[in-house]
Amino acid sequence: MAQNGLDTDIQFLPGVGPKRASLLKKELAVETVGQLLRLYPFRYIDRSSFMRICDLRPDMAYIQIRAVVLRAEVIDRKRLSVWVGDGTGEIETVFFKGMKWMAEKLKPGSEFIFFGKPTAFNGRINIVHPEVDTPSTEATGNSTGAGSTMTGVYTSTEKLKNGGVTGKVMNKLMDAALSKGLPYVEESLPEYIMKQHGLVPLHFALRNIHFPKDMVSLEKAKYRLKFEELFYLQLSLLKQKYVRSRAEQGIMMPRVGEAFNRCYEALPFPLTGAQKRVITEIRNDMKSGHQMNRLLQGDVGSGKTMVAVLTALIAIGNGFQACIMAPTEVLAQQHYKNIQKFLEPTGVKSALLTGSSKASERREVHAGLEDGSVGIIVGTHALIEDNVIFKNLGLVIIDEQHRFGVEQRSKLWRKASCGAPPHVLVMTATPIPRTLAMTLYGDLDVSVIDELPPGRKPVQTIHATDGKRPALYKFMRDQIALGRQIFIVYPLINETEKLDYQSLEAGAEEIMQKFPFPDYKTAVVHGKQLNDVKKFNMDAFAAGRADILVATSVIEVGVDVPNASVMVIESAERFGLSQLHQLRGRVGRGSEKSYCVLMTGHKLSKESRHRIELMCATENGFELAEEDMKMRGPGDLEGTQQSGLPISLNIASLAKDGLILNAAREAAESVLDSDPTLSENRNSLLVKELKKDKYQIKDYSKIS
Ligand code: ADP
Ligand code: MG
């Protein structure tokens, strides 16, 4: 038998037994009393307030009505339709399952409480499968919750419901779990932190999260539990950062150097304030004697390349080599090409190394890296896979970080040749909401370029459906007549998806029919082409030899064609917000007015419609990223799929609890500021908690 009430198997709780216990284990992964206590309600029913039927609207969230059954009838043997009324109106409730049982229960003339979501159906409002309660059982309620008007609602599944684990049963279980387990629950935050931040004790929080005494107690309970979760997460991340900054010696780069100055003086434009600020931050890192681990976030077109070049030149100026890695061949080539003009006045030698570099070129580059004559190397994964040896690598710049796996990055890491690891700058154009950045990169320093170079015109974003295609083609012809170029992008969500290629091919064919050669020139680019072919077509478009580029989302990252002024995105509803935003960033780079046309089907889900509307409403990448996170949750955001969130949150939400996260982050910082090793007595509880599984954060192999 378990020593500790928290380890007790839930099958020993009254009303459970082996069968329900195995169901709970399967459906909710709950086995012990302790685990059960940490399964929090996701919503509460306010027993004290009822809506009037006449006030119900189809867009309402879950509501509760108190109504008398008027009539019930089974329709087509498929569904039970029960009309109920409360004096202000009548509404139909519908049941597809358990019809017989419901029909017996819902006798005309008797009163019930119905809880559910009003939906529009055939021009009327109805409620499908409401929870049904009899007013009398509700009055007796549960023992612990006496005086409470709120009842917790827990995640449930069809199987749980069929197995008799209803909402009411869950409430009873929680009541039993609290009596059995709570005495064994130990406080998990030090007294002084609770005091400083006005947090309620854990016992109070657990009791009130399940059975809120009132609204205020519930808020206090939630705040305490969320704070605790975010606090330990931040403490864990920041502790890694503290440990590393003490442990890792960095390469000292005290000078700016001549190459930097020559490049800077020859710039055709003044740097933006944001670029200057970021370069100062980077420069301070590089001369600090500690290794730089910095994330540089900047919207598409914000001028990150410039920052990368100047950063690389600082390394050069201190006698080190720099490497710039891009996620794709096309991008590496583009980077290489772009930086030439900036390097020209400096005399620094650069080279390009990708999967398609010829053997002879490759040998030459290898030799140059080994003897140090090549100062800046630009490339793709080939930089890692290859047997590349540096004379003295001092800086690694990684563009579009999320495309690189942790493993690949750490390989590069090991190429350090002079004892200390190279400085690392990770650049990403995917705006990440601040709360997510703090969590994903909590152990990195973050710089943000939040200002676009002057003179960029806003991109006008338009939503259109198939019926508007003739108008779209006319608009495209007009633009081409003005000398502009046009991107048309097809979704390639799944590399192996045949359909995606089919729609691209069909689309390209139609374009070539409507825009016939030789009056119009169309280039096609997709992931299945050989690198040479891809490059040829890309180049044709970049050099202005093609008017239209039909592509899959391979062009998503980075290509710079200032003369392109129209971006048409086909099946735009299939793209996520941040991807749409990335694609739109391909236009509006020149001096002409630019357009983004989002083509969608007629029928859009509510969420897709919302996405499209947001795109039409704002160009601010951070705003879009925040919204994206609210809609899809942080786990599905671009940039997080690969690395995943470092821990899974049980109650706090990165999308909604930004303020609590701030407070928790500050609290963790202040703890570590005064006791970096957590060796003070009052912090011993923190050390113990941090050892728990849930706070073990994946090591991002030091880079991110
Ligand atoms: P990102 O990599 O952040 O998407 P780029 O570095 O490609 O952006 O810059 C986009 C364009 O803006 C480039 O053509 C670049 O030469 C130009 N640019 C960069 N910085 C400035 C600046 N301070 N003023 C004017 N133009 C700039
Ligand atoms: Mg770029």
Image (cartoon, rainbow, N blue to C red):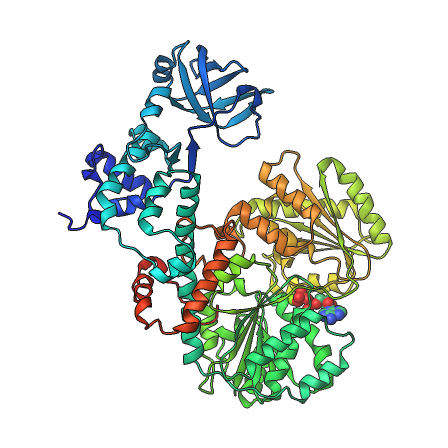
Q: Which of these two is toward me, 440 or 484?
A: 440
Q: Which of these two is toward me, 667 or 612?
A: 667
Residue 348 x %, y %: 66, 86
Instruction: Please tell me whether residue 542 is drawn above or below residue 412 in the rendered image.
Output: above
Residue found at the very far right of the displayed protein: 482
Q: Quadrant of ligand 2?
A: bottom right
Taking 66 as reference, is 270 left or right?
right
Measuring 43% from the left and 57% from the top, which residue is drawn there?
197
Taking 169 as reference, is 670 left or right?
right
Residue 500 visible, this angle: yes
Instruction: Please tell me whether residue 255 is drawn above or below residue 487 in the rendered image.
Output: below
- Could you say which quadrant of the image residue 148 lies in? top left
Instruction: Please tell me whether residue 13 is drawn above or below residue 385 in the rendered image.
Output: above
Residue 363 visible, this angle: no
- Could you say which quadrant of the image residue 701 lies in? bottom left
Measuring 49% from the left and 53% from the top, which residue is drawn there?
654
Taking 538 as reference, is 54 left or right?
left
Residue 388 x %, y %: 50, 80
Residue 494 x %, y %: 53, 50
Residue 363 x %, y %: 56, 83
Q: How many marks?
A: 0
Measuring 44% from the left and 68% from the top, which residue is drawn there?
670
- Could you say which quadrant of the image residue 104 lies in? top left
Taking 54 as reference, is 31 left or right?
left
Measuring 43% from the left and 42% from the top, which residue is drawn there?
216
Q: Which of these two is toward me, 441 or 189?
A: 189
Q: Which of these two is toward me, 541 or 394?
A: 394
